[in-house]
Image: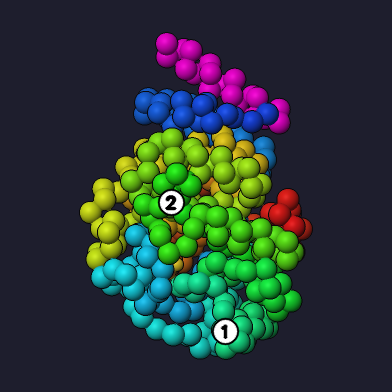
């Protein structure tokens, strides 16, 4: 039985290396494998990562330009006005702060800085002007890639942002469609998908993933991966829930380290050619943090996240050095290669 399982993992790896794909049923089988198979799974995931993305990894960072009092009711989020979360509340931070953050992030080797804002897109003229100022500041700061994550977008706003100089748009699907109503009721899963479409149609590269460990079942983790594959998302951030005090999910037990690694590996098998980017929740891996790359991750977000603190950047950079992994710092190359199918 054990031999057959190892053989099946190897066969799947070979099929994907040859350009094939893994079915949802196979994903469901894989995500249920016992921990004893994790090393074999990771060996396959590592081969896929090295073949399709190379051994270097990509790093990005974010700047939370406004926080708290959000109209949306996402159950995991401490910024929602619907819950009793503890996230700080502030309006737009000074433009100079974003430029400073961009220069700092670039000095770490990150290729992109994402400007992130709570809530529902950019609706008013004032919000549009503010976005223009931030994007001008990013352009003036360095050659760092210009990314934004400002919620649900309509077609016109996506075009406006592109014309302002935005390059990439990040918008997570958050979770599987079949679980989404448990996570958010103030906007729909379809609106998330439409947002990605509008961004892509406007000529922006798109980045979309989700948060795992919010109470979804194993099949729903695979379902999200399949949806991202169907949408041909090339840059997939994975977060692992950090339960936030005062939110409906505050008492959820965080995913265990081995479960996180297995999930990353399954995403690499489901999305063999994608940039799989590890973001929030890395601390739950404890001593196993450096193993995310062997499990198939090819990118990492460094610095602080939205409502949770990241690791010290120096520790992350040392970890990468110890692994012999180079951070791809070439923004021009990234502009040409990453998310190319989303262009
Ligand atoms: S995840 Fe975004 S949209 Fe949802 S409550 Fe938090 S800030 Fe608002």
First to last magenta residue range: 1-19
Question: Does mark 1's beta carbon lie closer than 8 Å to ligand 1?
Answer: no
* Secondary structure state at the residue bearing disc 1: loop
Which image quarter is the N terminus in?
A: top left
Looking at marks 2 and 1 on the same chain, the residue that comes earlier in the sequence is marked by 1
Instruction: Please name the residue shown 50% across and 39% down the image.
Output: 223
Q: Is residue 73 left or right of residue 99?
A: left
Pick the front one: 185 or 332: 185
Which image quarter is the C terminus in?
A: bottom right
Q: Within the displayed image, which quadrant is ligand 1 positioned in?
A: bottom left
Classify 10 Å Cα crowding around label 2: few (below 14), some (14-19), many (20 and above).
some
* Secondary structure state at the residue bearing disc 2: helix
Pick the front one: 45 or 184: 184
Q: Position of residue 48 (x, y in %)?
A: 61, 35
Q: Is residue 97 above or below residue 323?
A: below
Pick the front one: 249 or 266: 249
For residue 124, the mark is 1
Would you say residue 320 sits in the magenta stretch? no
Q: Is residue 167 above or below residue 334?
A: below
Q: Is residue 151 above or below residue 191?
A: below
Q: Position of residue 88 (x, y in %)?
A: 34, 78
Query: Most prominent secondary structure in the magenta stretch?
Result: helix
For residue 107, the mark is none
Instruction: Please name the residue shown 47% across and 17% down the image.
Output: 5
Instruction: Please name the residue shown 53% across and 45% down the image.
Output: 297
Q: CA distance from mark 2 to mark 1?
A: 28 Å
Pick the front one: 282 or 172: 172
Q: Which residue in the structure is indicated by mark 2?
A: 180
The quarter of the picture where residue 156 lies is: bottom right
Query: Is residue 200 visible in this depiction of the protein?
Result: yes
């Amino acid at each position: 039985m054990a031999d057959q399982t190892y053989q099946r993992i190897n066969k799947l790896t070979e099929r994907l290396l040859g350009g094939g794909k893994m079915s949802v049923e196979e994903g469901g089988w894989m995500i249920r494998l016992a921990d004893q198979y994790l090393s074999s799974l990771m060996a396959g995931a590592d081969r896929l990562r090295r073949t399709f993305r190379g051994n270097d990894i990509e790093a990005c960072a974010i700047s939370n330009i406004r926080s708290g009092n959000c109209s949306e009711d996402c159950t995991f989020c401490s910024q929602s006005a619907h819950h009793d979360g503890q996230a700080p509340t502030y309006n737009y931070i000074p433009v100079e702060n974003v430029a400073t953050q961009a220069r700092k992030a670039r000095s770490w080797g990150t290729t992109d800085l994402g400007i992130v804002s709570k809530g529902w897109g950019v609706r008013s003229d004032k919000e549009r002007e503010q976005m223009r100022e931030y994007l001008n500041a990013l352009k003036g700061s360095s050659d760092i890639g210009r990314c934004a994550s400002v919620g649900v977008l309509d077609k016109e706003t996506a075009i406006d942002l592109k014309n302002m100089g935005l390059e990439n748009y990040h918008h997570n699907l958050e979770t599987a469609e079949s679980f989404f109503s448990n996570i958010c009721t103030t906007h729909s899963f379809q609106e998330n998908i439409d947002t990605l479409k509008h961004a892509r149609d406007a000529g922006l590269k798109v980045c979309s993933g989700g948060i795992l460990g919010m109470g979804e079942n194993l099949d729903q983790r695979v379902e999200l991966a399949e949806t991202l594959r169907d949408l041909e998302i090339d840059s997939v951030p994975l977060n692992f829930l950090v339960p936030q005090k005062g939110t409906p999910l505050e008492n959820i037990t965080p995913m265990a380290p081995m479960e996180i690694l297995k999930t990353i590996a399954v995403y690499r098998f489901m999305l063999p050619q994608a940039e799989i980017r590890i973001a929030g929740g890395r601390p739950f891996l404890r001593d196993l943090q450096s193993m995310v790359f062997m499990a198939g991750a090819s990118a990492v977000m460094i610095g602080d996240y939205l409502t949770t603190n990241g690791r010290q950047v120096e520790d992350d950079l040392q970890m990468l050095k110890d692994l012999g992994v180079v951070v791809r710092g070439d923004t021009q190359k990234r502009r040409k290669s990453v998310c190319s199918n989303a262009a």
